[in-house]
Image (tube, rainbow, N blue to C red):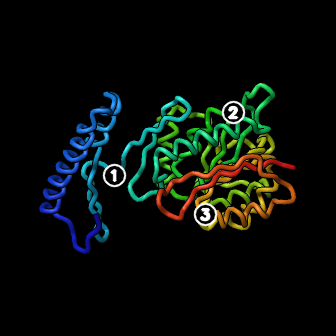
């Protein structure tokens, strides 16, 4: 909740009362559905207990009790845990988000970063990794994952999520996509790349991008052609078509999926898996 005046004890007391009412309403709602299995009811009750209230004013933020929620997604029979921080980007539809992660795992199993038996051996590059949404899901599928993200808060959340899910084979660089691209092309060095596998030892063949609605920047778009496999997740079909057009002569669409993240709206999420012709 956002205000134009400072928040004091009176607001905190009212917020606690609101929180109690909301938690009671959530628990009552799910308790009335007798068809829900006991395990589902327990998960939903946990969700109610995890309901937090946040107040914002100028240079002020009051959290009751936390500034994040913990989200659990079941992806291919494995539970993934995510810390979703208030104010940061997250997938709006958890059910569809799980399907997107499952799809990404499925298409990359057939990439050239795997041997004939499907064992991982390469290192994919992920641009715009955010809080590690796809990173967490794909880490077990590869020997190592190199990821970039410019937001400090998102990088911190991503590192938390990787640790929570036992993913130790990921290197995250807090850099903009175009900065990483320029450095990779020149085989240069930056302080934020310390600890990363040396350039000449990296085997980057698969690229995963999940850019904002504006699509890829010019440098990243040019980068598409250097990868034999590209997984492109897009919330804007128009910029997806534009960016795919940049590699139409060298790549073909091997897999394509549409995810209805936003029911009853004109917006749609797309997944495209491109491979060299």
In whole angstroms, how far apart are the C-alphas of marks 3 and 1?
29 Å
Q: Position of residue 186 (x, y in %)?
A: 79, 58
- Residue 232 as seen in the image, left or right of residue 229: left
Q: Which label is found at residue 236?
A: 3
Q: Give whichever of 36, 87 is nearer the camera.
A: 36
Instruction: Give coordinates of residue 209: x percent, y percent.
Output: 66, 53
Q: Identify the residue under disc 1.
A: 67
In the displayed structure, 201 sits above or below 62; it is above
**SS of the residue under disc 3:** loop
Q: Are marks 2 and 3 in contact (CB under 8 Å)?
A: no
Residue reaching furthest bottom?
4
As measured in the structure, the alpha-carbon distance from the residue carrying label 2 to the one carrying label 3 is 31 Å
Q: Determine which quarter of the picture holds residue 121.
A: top right
Closer to viewer: mark 2 or mark 3? 3
Mark 2 / mark 1, whichever is N-terminal: 1
Marks 1 and 2: in contact by CB < 8 Å? no
Question: Counting residues from the N terminus, which is met first, the one under dot 2 or under dot 3?
Answer: 2
Q: Is residue 251 visible?
A: yes
Considering depth in this image, is 102 or 175 the residue closer to the camera? 102
Quadrant placement of the N terminus: bottom left
Q: CA distance from mark 2 to mark 1?
A: 33 Å
Q: Is residue 136 left or right of residue 47?
A: right
Q: Which numbered dot is residue 143?
A: 2
Q: In the rendered image of this protein, does residue 7 appear above or below residue 114?
A: below
Residue at 30% from the left image edge and 71% from the top image edge: 58
Above or below, comparing residue 276 to residue 62 in the picture? above
């Amino acid at each position: 909740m956002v205000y134009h005046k400072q928040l004091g004890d009176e607001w905190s007391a009212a917020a606690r009362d609101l929180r109690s009412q909301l938690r009671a309403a959530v628990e009552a709602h799910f308790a009335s559905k007798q068809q829900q299995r006991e395990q589902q009811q327990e998960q939903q009750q946990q969700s109610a207990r995890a309901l937090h209230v946040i107040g914002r004013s100028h240079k002020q933020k009051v959290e009751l009790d936390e500034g994040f929620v913990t989200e659990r997604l079941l992806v291919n029979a494995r539970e993934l845990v995510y810390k979703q921080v208030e104010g940061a980007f997250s997938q709006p539809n958890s059910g569809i988000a799980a399907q997107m992660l499952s799809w990404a795992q499925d298409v990359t199993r057939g990439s050239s970063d795997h041997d004939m038996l499907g064992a991982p051996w390469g290192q994919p590059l992920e641009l715009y990794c955010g809080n590690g949404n796809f990173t967490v899901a794909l880490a077990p599928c590869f020997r190592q994952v190199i990821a970039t993200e410019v937001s400090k808060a998102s990088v911190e959340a991503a590192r938390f999520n990787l640790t929570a899910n036992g993913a130790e084979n990921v290197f995250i660089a807090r850099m903009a996509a175009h900065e990483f691209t320029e450095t990779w092309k020149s085989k240069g060095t930056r302080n934020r790349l310390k600890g990363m596998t040396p350039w000449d030892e990296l085997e980057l063949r698969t690229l995963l991008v999940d850019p904002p609605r504006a699509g890829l920047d010019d440098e990243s778009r040019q980068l598409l052609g250097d990868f034999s496999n590209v997984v492109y997740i897009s919330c804007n079909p128009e910029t997806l078509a534009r960016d795919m057009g940049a590699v139409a002569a060298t790549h073909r669409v091997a897999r394509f999926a549409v995810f209805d993240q936003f029911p009853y709206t004109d917006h749609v999420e797309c997944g495209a898996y491109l491979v060299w012709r």
